[in-house]
Amino acid sequence: MASVNFIFTIHFHQPHGQLKWINERIYENSYKLLLEIFKKYADLHFTVHISGPLLLYMIENHPDWLEEIAKLGDYGTIEFLAGSLGEAILPLLPYSDRVNQVREYIRLFEKYFGVKPRGLWLPERVWEPSLPVPLAENGIEYVLIDDSTLLRAGHPQEDAYYAWITEEGGERVKVFFIEAGLRYVLPWSSSEEVFNYMMSRATDKGDRVLVWGSDAEKFGEWADPGWARWWLNDFLSKLRLRRNEIRLVHPTEYLREHSVRGLIYLPTGSYDKMLEWSNGFFRNFQLKYKESNNMHKKMLYVRGKLVKAPRVPREAWILYYLAQCNDAYWHGLFGGIYLSHLRQAIYENLIKAEKIAEEEMGYYEKHEPVIKRVDFDYDGKMEILYESKKLNAYFKPSDGGTMFELDIKRDGYEHNLQDTMTRYPEPYLHDSGFNPDWYRRVSLRIHLWDPSTTLHDWINNTPFKDNSDLALKEFSASITPGNELIMRSLGGYYQAGSLISRILVEKRIMIRDNALSTTYVIENKGDKPVTTKIGYEYHLAPKIDRTGKGEPIGFVVNGEFYTRDNEWGGITRQVVFKAPEYPDVKLTTRKDEIYWIAPLNMLARTEKGFRPIPQGVAVMIIREKNLEPGDREELTVKLELL
């Protein structure tokens, strides 16, 4: 009689930094439903992974749910999988971080469940050949990855229906393969269609295994909870009756009965859609998204301080590991890196960990501030890092002399005010009319706009409105004995592709306490007049209240409050940005100027459809000028945390 083994793996995960109301909705719609199903079918065998960030959340908010699901593990219904504490993409991390991410997860899991998992759920199933070493060091016996990785190694599909063993440097781990075909029919097809699919893989020998592994949210969150409950009851009740044909087993049960097929070597890989989104290699996200690379390199920079400090409390390392949570570092069809609250949580943790490390290593004992030239983003060009006990400000002379990070380090208010997101040309936005950004949406960038340019042109990227090359020009940088940063560049002003005049730009930046003051000097070095709108650009990321207290984020101009969804254009000398439970942030000029203020929104795809996702608030200070040869224009802008 033909039969097949079936491993039914459900992955519970919500990222570190998720909005509390979303976590609670998913808990009500999906997680409670699945616990109910596990109890009802306790005679069957399920495989479950609860991610580190979600496990920490449930310990704090729903310990009863964890207690009930732990009992099902004791009873033998559930076999639990380990993971990484921060649900981090392990290959992106230094070797010791890979080891410790898994070690800290196991430590946390054992504390609350009293048992050590033998297998591991690999975040986003991102596999690289070096992984057996850190997994084996933690006593992990097996891992689940996708059959696409097997196929990329040149193996036939039928090899995906067995367990294998792989090694790196003599360290071994067993491998199961999640079958993409099964993942696309379960639960989207009827029970009978799923059973027919499974039985098409069955053999008389009965030693094959079909592995399904995917998100818990498919049951009750991404689809109607009533439908999910009906489908699971229908599927599992019928599966009980077909247990001689389709044996629902745990991975360790399968290994005990059938062992492994043999030795195998695998290339880098992930599931099919991830390979599509990343052009075949997950690390490509760091090349596509400067913001992803920024977070990753900030993580490595903070790590450098942690390892140099003589005594770092475990709390700092936990903050650091949670800042490696994968969701904010990439983008596919859904929010990902465009979800500003996830990026915010990454920086919040990194800044907190950095502060602890700096205190332990006496970072500012000899002098404050610390100003250094570092190739921070690993592109071969030097950035300027200004660091003090109160804030960090990072500048990139090679990208228009801009500021790309502004970390507030005040206790309880740790936040990167410059954590705004560029809008990239995503494939799903093709033919949508959306114009992606042509420069990184950071601060201190200079534009010489065509006089006809409007606020709408600027924020929506109407082509060919900036008549100069200064926005993307490389600037020279020097630091005075008084810690003033000076950046200069000589660019051109063009019309119809022809050079009209040379324009010198100088930026003099002083930082005091929680304030950054920038004096801009624009000088016409040519022999022809230039009629333009000079634009001084800032982008800010107000702090989001992730607990959901409902107070709006917005800004105050001339005594009137506007939510961040509003555009505003007019005359003022001050804009105050307001966010719940966070100090005001003020942007000021010495006298009245033209201000353009607009929401920086990305049209992103979510599991609920397309919607605009806020990425920050954009401000352009405008001066309409006719610069005669030799004319010199000066403006000072102050940005401060109140």
Image: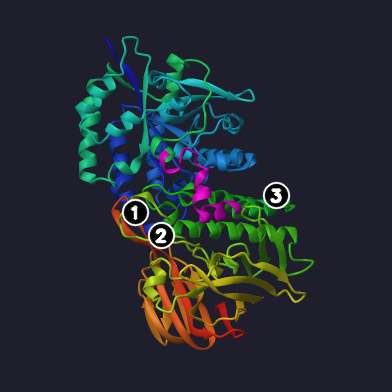
Q: Position of residue 628 (x, y in %)?
A: 56, 85
Residue sitting at x 63%, y 70%: 489
Reading the chain from its start, which is encountered first: label 1 or label 2? 1
User: Quarter-wise, where is residue 274 in the image?
Assistant: top left
Residue 123 in view here: yes
Horizontal side of residue 221 vs 281, given as left or right: left
Q: Position of residue 168 (x, y in %)?
A: 61, 26
User: Quarter-wise, where is residue 520 in the image?
Assistant: bottom right
The residue singled out by tag 2 in the image is: 436
| Highlighted range, magenta | 276-297
In the depicted view, which residue is nearer to us: 506 or 182? 506
Q: Position of residue 597 (x, y in %)?
A: 42, 76
Q: Position of residue 584 (x, y in %)?
A: 50, 77
Q: Which mark is residue 307?
A: 3
Q: What is the spatial separation of the Cα atoms under label 2 and label 3, in whole angstroms?
A: 39 Å
Q: Quadrant of the N terminus?
A: top left
In the depicted view, which residue is nearer to us: 107 or 304? 304
SS at circle 3: helix
The residue singled out by tag 1 in the image is: 429
Reading the chain from its start, which is encountered first: label 2 or label 3? 3
Amino acid type indicated by mark 2: Pro
Closer to viewer: mark 3 or mark 1? 1
SS at circle 1: helix
Tell me if mark 2 has few (under 14), some (14-19) or many (20+) residues whose alpha carbon lies within 10 angstroms of its own: some
In the depicted structure, whether residue 197 falls above or below residue 446: above
Amino acid type indicated by mark 3: Val
Horizontal side of residue 346 vs 237, given as left or right: right
Tell me if mark 3 has few (under 14), some (14-19) or many (20+) residues whose alpha carbon lies within 10 angstroms of its own: few
